[in-house]
Structures are given as structure tokens and as C-alpha cells.
Amino acid sequence: MTEIAFHFNAPDKLAYACRFARKLLRMGDPRLSIAGPAAVLDQLDPMLWNMAAHDFVAHCRADSDPVVLEASPIVLLCDLSQSPHHDVLLNLWDLVPEGFEQFSKVIEIVGRDDAADRQQARARWRHYAHSGYNLIRHDLEQRGS
């Protein structure tokens, strides 16, 4: 069964997504799919390439050349059916994405100061819980992340 983890109280969801992707990439395993609306992925894409002066997170878009897509450990996509791998999904959609259960692990990031985002996260939490998934809670304020 897919493992679902909520990371609560992120001061900046996209900045946290970048740090999470970098951490996973440095671990060398597993592969990451980042799913969300095109407008959000358009913001995230340059952030991953420009994390710091000499730091970036190599990635590609789901519509990249098949060779690049297969070689990339991180893929940005709007449609989960386009994912070339099914290890970890970082969900940036407001809703539970259709097909999430094909991934080994789903990460949900919840902003600290956005009431609408927190409300949408509660709805996703309820969906997963009612579907029988064991939910893991990470409070980023307590961890200092």
C-alpha cells in the first residue's frame, strides 16, 4: 500500500519542494515525480535549476525526449500517467491526484500561512484516511526545516 506523508507548516511550499527534491537526489534513490498544475510547475522549474550559485537539481518535464525522461531522476508532470517511474510522488495539486496509488510513497506539502491550502490539505488527509491509508505527519516547525 502507498505510504502517505504530510509535511506541515512549510513557510514556502515551492522552496520546500526544491529542498526535498535535492535531498532525494543526493540520496541517489528513489526517483521522484513532482505533479501539479502547469502554472505551479512553471514556477518550480527555474527554482530547481537555480537553488544557489553552484547548486541545482537536475530534472526534466514529462514531455522531454524519451531518453532524457528515462535518465532523469526527477520529472515534473501534470498528468500522473506520464510518469516514467513510480517511486515517490510529490503532490502540488489542491486535490488528491488520480492514480496516486501507483506510487510507493506520496508526499503532501502544506503551507504554514495559507488558510486555503491548509483547508485543501485537510480534505486530502480525510480522503486518504477514509480510503484506509496510514498517514505520516511531519511538522516542519518542530523540525526547524
Image (cartoon, helix red, strand yellow):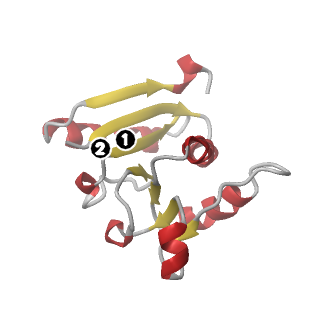
Q: In whole angstroms, how far apart are the C-alphas of marks 1 and 2? A: 5 Å
Give the image location of residue 127, x and y in percent.
21, 43
Q: Quadrant of the N terminus?
A: top left
Counting other residues with Cα less than 10 Å from the Cα at mark 1, is it few (<14), some (14-19), or many (20 or more)? many
Image position, residue 38 (x, y; %): 51, 70
In this rendering, the answer to whether 12 lies above or below 90 is above
Among the 4 quarters of the image, the one containing residue 40: bottom right
The residue drawn where x is 19% and y is 35% is 129
Query: In the image, residue 88 lies at what x, y percent?
Result: 40, 49
Q: Quadrant of the C terminus?
A: top right
Q: Is residue 38 visible?
A: no
Q: Residues within 10 Å of mark 2 (few under 14, many from 20)?
A: some
In the displayed structure, 144 sits above or below 71; it is above
Q: Which of 117/43 is in front?
A: 43
Instruction: Where is residue 14? Give x, y as percent.
Output: 59, 49
Q: Secondary structure at mark 1?
A: helix
Residue at 37% x, 41% y is 121
Q: Is residue 45 left or right of residue 5?
A: right
Please identify the quarter of the rendering in which residue 93 is found: bottom left
Q: Amino acid at mark 2?
A: Arg
Q: Toward the viewer: 25 or 4? A: 25
Residue under pointer 2: 124
Instruction: Name the residue beneath numbered marker 1.
Output: 121
Residue nearest the viewer, comparing 129 with 56: 56
Q: Label 2's element?
A: helix
Q: Amino acid at mark 1?
A: Ala
